[in-house]
Image (cartoon, helix red, strand yellow):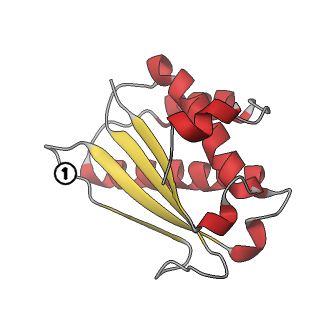
């Protein structure tokens, strides 16, 4: 069974911001879909949210870190500052995850490693339908920093 890990690197100024809530929401929704993940390599996506006091050292998305003995393909996504407090934050998170999924598919295809893109897409689609904010207890129990 594969796995998926979602995290956010951010300054304290973005605590409970739209981007923070969107990432926590999708991470919780994906955790509930864990039993439906297709077999094969796992994915890790770390979002880095730009703020007035902090900025990642890259823009866009970068990929790397896959090894056969640790079958998880890692992605880092630099969230543009204008999306941190935007009502479009949830859409941005979903689009970034779908982009990572497409990049993972292409990468594994080049390596000749089986990767069930359709299965992963079903899991992402189910997670995207979750609209409620995470419960307040999630902020203490599941810190994503």
Asked if residue 52 can be seen in this view, the reply is yes
Asked if residue 92 can be seen in this view, the reply is no
Q: Vertical placement of 98 versus 32: above or below?
A: below
User: Quick check: 25 left or right of 102?
Assistant: right
Q: Report x, y in % for residue 34.
A: 47, 23
Q: Vertical placement of 139 versus 62: above or below?
A: above
| Residue 72 image-quadrant placement | top left
User: Quick check: 87 left or right of 82?
Assistant: right
Q: Report x, y in % for residue 140.
A: 56, 39
Nearest to the observer: residue 99 or residue 70: 70
Badge 1 element: loop
For the point 61% across and 56% down, which residue is it? 96
Residue matched to label 1? 67
Q: Report x, y in % for residue 69.
A: 13, 43
Nearest to the observer: residue 119 or residue 93: 93
Q: Report x, y in % for residue 75.
A: 43, 58
| Residue 81 image-quadrant placement | bottom right
For the point 74% across and 57% down, which residue is it? 17
For the point 80% across and 64% down, which residue is it? 85
Nearest to the observer: residue 12 or residue 40: 12
């Amino acid at each position: 069974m594969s796995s998926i890990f979602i995290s956010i690197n951010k300054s304290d100024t973005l605590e409970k911001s739209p981007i923070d809530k969107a990432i926590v929401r999708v991470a919780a929704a994906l955790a509930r879909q864990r039993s439906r993940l297709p077999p094969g390599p796992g994915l890790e996506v770390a979002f880095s949210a730009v703020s007035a006091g902090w900025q990642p050292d890259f823009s866009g998305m970068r990929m790397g870190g896959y090894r056969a003995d640790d079958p998880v393909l890692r992605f880092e996504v630099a969230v543009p500052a204008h999306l941190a407090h935007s009502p479009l934050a949830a859409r941005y998170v979903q689009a970034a995850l779908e982009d990572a999924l497409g990049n993972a598919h292409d990468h594994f295809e080049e390596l000749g490693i089986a990767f069930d893109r359709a299965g992963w897409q079903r899991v992402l689609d189910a997670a995207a339908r979750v609209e409620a904010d995470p419960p307040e207890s999630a902020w203490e129990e599941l810190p994503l920093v």
